[in-house]
Amino acid sequence: MHDSRRVRLVLAAALIAAVALITVDFRDGGSSPLRHVGASIFGPAERVTSDVTSPVSSLFDWVTGGPSADSKIAALQAANARLRAELSAEQLSRADEAQLSSLLRLAGRGGYKIVAASVIAAGQDYANSVTLDVGTQDGVHAQETVLTGDGLVGTVTQVSRDTSTVLLATDASAVVGARMADTDQVGSVTGTGESLSGPYLLRLRLFDANVALHVGEPLVTFGSVQDQPYVPGVPIGQVSQVQGNAGSLTQTALVKPYVHFTSLGVVGVVVAGPARDPHDSVLPAAPKPAPTVTVTVTPSSAVPSSGAPSSPVPGG
């Protein structure tokens, strides 16, 4: 009890002395001799306190985000954001480059004059329509065919100065004239408007109900009058399921399109059709069947297992 009272008295005296020194120093503008006396008295204690609390204070600032920590963290976050953006842009440019190369190859084989574009938006249902970043200022007009390096995408329905809307071939209202590559039979392809058994499918109806359809048969666009809305020879897809029999009122089938409608990136708007129908020259090459290996086995002559045959013995 006596010790604690003495401690309180010492602390009170030190506090009074500190207040007095601050008051005198403030009045003298910081040039009072008592400033040096106070420094000699309280300096050692201040240095000890600073040595003890400085590491703790630095740690607290680092954990809670002091000014220096904030700037370092912000710089690291900005650097990471730049790296992520650069990586995404590189991956996107590689994908776009591959799609553009494929598109140019198809346009060259078919003789189509195209305007390359990027898909910038999709409708509420991705299977219905998409928006492109090209418009009238790029030479694009309504009722023009849209394709990728794989085949038919759809047709332009609306155009503004900078953008255009494309109705996809998978939409239920889309109708495309089609021709079977193997038999030259013609019909119409419509969208189903939904995904059947996984991938988007189209529905084919042949005009001649007596023609037999076969799974795997490819079909291309038949072409429209003055190439609008569809130019001829664009690959559409392959028959994946036959739904009617030859001789029935309607001969129908489901078609698996060549185009992956869920991953559209770079497309081409055909602003001028081919000088002549490319027919089937734009179709993707069919995979070559594996060569058949024929092995010929030649039977060997029989060899007796019990010695050589006896030869005649001359008589004696």
Image (spheres, rainbow, N blue to C red):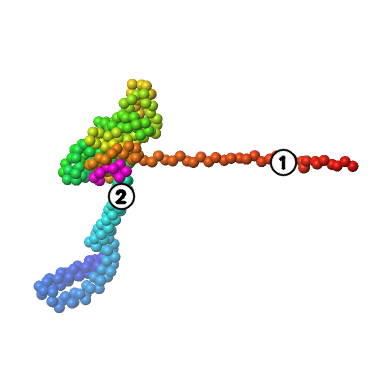
Please provide percent x and percent y for residue 156. 22, 38
User: Is any part of residue 281 visible from this angle?
Assistant: yes
Tell me: 244 left or right of 54: right
> Is residue 195 placed above or below 23 in the rendered structure?
above
Front position in the image: 62 or 276: 276
User: Is any part of residue 95 visible from this angle?
Assistant: no
User: Where does the magenta region start and end?
Assistant: 107-118
Please provide percent x and percent y for residue 280. 34, 37
Q: Secondary structure at mark 1?
A: loop
Front position in the image: 158 or 290: 290
Q: Do the numbered discs 2 and 1 sit on residues whose CB atoms are within 8 Å?
A: no
Front position in the image: 169 or 3: 169
The three-letter code of the residue at mark 2 reads Glu
Q: Quadrant of residue 205?
A: top left
Q: Name the disc covering residue 97, or none.
A: 2
The extreme right residue here reads 316
